[in-house]
Amino acid sequence: MMEEMIFFGNEICCGTYAFLNTIQEDTIDYKLFEITTTVPFGIKHQREMDFSRLLTTFCDPNEGVDKAAALWGYRQEKKIFEDEREAAAYIGEESYRHRCMVGPLDMGKLEYLLIPNLYTNMDHYITVFREGGELFCVDSEGIPARRISLEELKTWMCVKKLPEAKGHIAVRTFEREEGFVREKRDEQVLLRSISAIAGNIRKAEEAKQGSRAVKACWDWLGEQPMNRWRLSFLYDISFLIQRKFLQNYWKELLWKFDILKKGTIYEIGDIVERQIDLLSDMFRFLRSDNRVYQENFIRLAELEREFYNTMEKVGKTDVSGA
């Protein structure tokens, strides 16, 4: 196979990894791209009996990639299908011309993963491409290139139980925009994404998610036996910590490019650091002692509300570099 760039790991959302594996550009700061999707900002709680979205992202990654791709100078073509056979056939033909980003898909249906049933009803994204006439998939879960068939691909087109998919199979291809200026790109995309980030946090609070999602999660867990949700909640805490690390990186970039007022940046950093410490304690208590404490949920909710209040103050007058 020809040499290609492969992006995988656990620092960012699988949607961003799939985007990078599709466009094959190594000059993009992958953490900054994830930030510009706005997915790391805002919390949502859903009462689902598989406990898969206890404290998940308010912004759907399926929508986040759409927003970020244009910011980074990529024109997207997004095809939507309801029939898995039509989706697989389209990918089979389009992959002769472009690498295809496919998702969200039900991760539990990707049989090449180790014990895939552990991931049932989780949204996931992959890249499909051709080389030498053969079809391959790339998965950020440590699958650099796997030869596949159209029949196999068809079995992966499962979206019916995924709220993020809304019953549709999405296939994306990308082209670089002609004339897009890449000079000072990181600074420009960061600057342009601030209003969307602030709006995302505001929408979460207005939808009675955000800080109230944390309180709602505590109420829901209290109604269910711990053995049913313990593993899922450990998973959600770890990924919420991951998103908080990205918020910390965002703070560092705001400082680097002198975009917000220094006092605001200090305030953002202090809130996020306290949230990371608190979430780490919650993870440790649950993993080691099988205990959760209401006061930790209350404090986490208060801090998320503080974050919202701070971001409400981030307006045009604050994006000054003063």
Image (cartoon, rainbow, N blue to C red):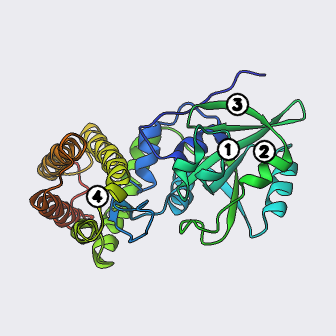
Query: How would you rate the neighbour count of disc 1 (Cα within 10 Å): few for under 14, some for 14-19, many for 20 or more?
Result: few
Q: Which residue is mark 1?
A: 111
Which mark is drawn over residue 226?
4
Which mark is drawn over residue 98?
2
Identify which residue, 48 or 312, lies in the foreground: 48
- Mark 4 and mark 1 in contact (Cβ < 8 Å)? no
Query: How would you rate the neighbour count of disc 3 (Cα within 10 Å): few for under 14, some for 14-19, many for 20 or more?
Result: some
Seen in the image, is 154 located left or right of residue 61? right
Residue at (71, 21) in percent of width and height: 3
Q: CA distance from mark 4 to mark 3?
A: 38 Å
Front label number (4 vs 3): 4
Q: What amino acid is labelled 1 in the image?
A: Glu
Q: What amino acid is labelled 4 in the image?
A: Met
Which mark is drawn over residue 259?
none
Identify which residue, 176 or 251, lies in the foreground: 251
Residue 112 occupies quadrant: top right
Q: Earlier in the sequence, mark 1 or mark 4?
A: 1
- Mark 1 and mark 3 in contact (Cβ < 8 Å)? no
Front label number (1 vs 2): 1
Front label number (1 vs 4): 4
Residue at (77, 22) in percent of width and height: 2
- Mark 2 and mark 3 in contact (Cβ < 8 Å)? no
Query: Of helix, strand and loop, which one carries label 2?
Result: loop
Residue 184 can be seen, yes or no:
no
Q: Residue 253's spot in the image, x, y percent?
A: 30, 40
Q: What amino acid is labelled 3 in the image?
A: Ala
Query: How would you rate the neighbour count of disc 2 (Cα within 10 Å): few for under 14, some for 14-19, many for 20 or more?
Result: some
Front label number (3 vs 2): 3
